[in-house]
Image (spheres, helix red, strand yellow):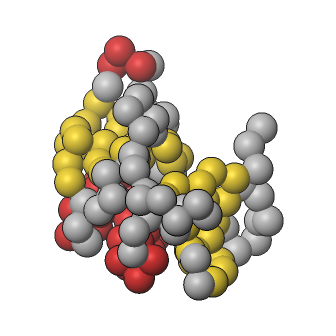
Amino acid sequence: MFSHIMLGTTDVDRAEAFYTAALAPLGLVPLHRHSQGIRFGREEDDLPFLSVVIPFDDAPATSGNGSMVAFVAESRSAVHAAHENALAHGGTCEGPPGPRPDYGDHYYGAYFRDPDGNKLHVVCRKAEA
């Protein structure tokens, strides 16, 4: 359904360090770096991908109220690792890892913000192993 998602940043180097650490437990890696940003995804797939960029209009990057990007985790331990890595690299907690029964029987997720304030979510929808 989606080709890609773009999030704004004010600091590409900081964004690269944050997203490289936070997304590694999900099997997502930096794919391409250019002067205005960096693209993350799976090495074997062209799509979908996440781009974190300096806004093209040169206005300050801002986060959207009510906006969030959610990533699939293959395990609950990957949810924990992504959350821990995000906080260790300048992110802030918006909800610790844990079950979210309102969203489904096996829904297990964590919420955090990147250093630019973008809200992110990591979710595993599998039964506990």
Side of 21 relative to 50 (left or right): left
Q: Position of residue 74 (x, y in %)?
A: 50, 51
Q: Is residue 51 visible?
A: no
Q: Quadrant of residue 12?
A: bottom left
| Residue toward you, 53 or 68 | 53
Side of 38 relative to 69 (left or right): right
Name which residue lies at 69% across and 53% down: 4
| Residue toward you, 86 or 77 | 86
36 to 101, vertically: above or below: below
Side of 50 relative to 65 (left or right): right
Q: Position of residue 51 (x, y in %)?
A: 60, 63
| Residue toward you, 10 or 120 | 10
Q: Position of residue 80 (x, y in %)?
A: 29, 54
Which residue extends farthest top?
Answer: 102
Q: Quadrant of residue 87?
A: bottom left
Name which residue lies at 61% across and 64% down: 56
Q: Position of residue 89 (x, y in %)?
A: 25, 71
Name which residue lies at 23% across and 67% down: 90
25 to 129, vertically: above or below: below
Name which residue lies at 58% across and 60% down: 57
